[in-house]
Amino acid sequence: MQFTDTNCFLCGTIITQEHRAPVFADWLQQKYNLKNKELLMLDKSVTTFGQLTLPCCDRCHTHYLLPLEAEVEQAAANGIEGMQALPPQRLFQWIGKMYYGSLVTELIKEADPLVMPEYAVSEDPKMLGKFRAFFQVLQSLRVPMEFDGFLPSSLFLLQVSPTEDELPFEYQDELTTMAFSIKLGPVAVVCTLLDNAIIRKAFGRLYQVTEGKELHPIQLAEFKARVFYAAYIFNVVPEYFIRPIKPEDDHLVLDTLIDDVTNEIFNPWEMTAYAHMLEEMLKPWGIREHQILQTPQQPISFLLDEQNQFKPMERFTKLV
């Protein structure tokens, strides 16, 4: 794991600064007209989707990234059914590549930032430990690898109603919590990258009531807020172990361990902190924290009714 412009992000091979791969694939940029759209980095500098690239050797680009992108492009062309048919490990790798590409860019910029960050991510031992663990499972992109009985991430696939959906593409990530979301037309993928699907299990009931439903964009925003906040309070870092290799093996098998004895898996869910996250997600609708917390222990929900059943919504009515 090396955060430099002169080592391939995936295999570590020494390369020149001309060896680059797009973080967001060319097909994504073309389909959603992203090339010149701006992105604000952590050091307050501005780049574009087209300029956001990661160091990548020709072999990794040709043999691993391009086939992955071709698979996802084909799946995305078939809507929610196509994305659901994509093997979860491939979807994890695709999200992971984009997340890690953004991470590499941010950490390279930390060496010469436009604005010095108050807390440098690259100087946080716990964060570096998380990145190392993630880099280990991301190697499944180039090394035949089986995760025995687990997936390193929680994946949620959601369908968005077109009635008031004005954004064909959306993307959001949180570097430190490893939460990520991307919306491709009517399909949204919400993901936490290094939790061994614990957050998906915790939200099993919520995910179940949304399956087969078309979500209004504000409902998607609430779903993201719940998942992103769960990632924020997730308190453990999984460890991964390669099983001893036998001469006849043609792939690696990984086992995993989570220390839930000396650490609580989740820190307490605090309604005020969750309301901050929800307010951030609901900015396009102008909903403020005091409206979210009118009933302090029962924050406003656009997803669920009082019986915790799915709340159908075709159009959003502005709160008074």
Image (cartoon, rainbow, N blue to C red):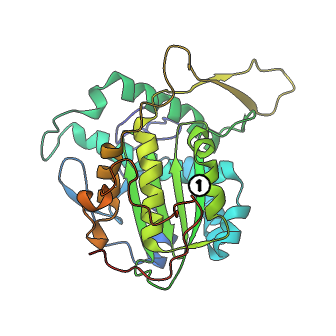
Q: Residue at x 69, y 63 (%)?
A: 84
Indicate the amino acid at tag 1: Leu
Give the x, y percent position of residue 30. 46, 76
Q: Is residue 282 left or right of residue 134?
A: left
Pointer 1 local density, CA inside 10 Å: few below 14, some 14–19, many at least 20 = some
Q: Work out whether residue 224 or residue 43 is closer to the camera in this orientation and state it.
A: 224
Residue 178 visible to an observer of this rendering: no
Give the x, y percent position of residue 150. 70, 36
Residue furthest to the right in view is 248
Q: Residue at x 83, y 20 (%)?
A: 246
Q: Residue at x 51, y 40 (%)?
A: 10
Q: Residue at x 35, y 64 (%)?
A: 49
Q: Quadrant of residue 232?
A: top left
Q: Secondary structure at mark 1?
A: helix
Vertical arrangement, residue 207 with respect to residue 213, above or below: above
Vertical arrangement, residue 255 with respect to residue 154, above or below: above
Q: Which residue is mark 1?
A: 206
Q: Work out whether residue 207 or residue 17 is closer to the camera in this orientation and state it.
A: 207
Q: Is residue 193 left or right of residue 78?
A: left
Residue furthest to the bottom in view is 163
Give the x, y percent position of residue 220. 47, 65
Give the x, y percent position of residue 284. 30, 71
Q: Work out whether residue 56 or residue 242 is closer to the camera in this orientation and state it.
A: 242
Vertical arrangement, residue 300 with respect to residue 249, above or below: below
Q: Quarter holding the N terminus?
A: top left
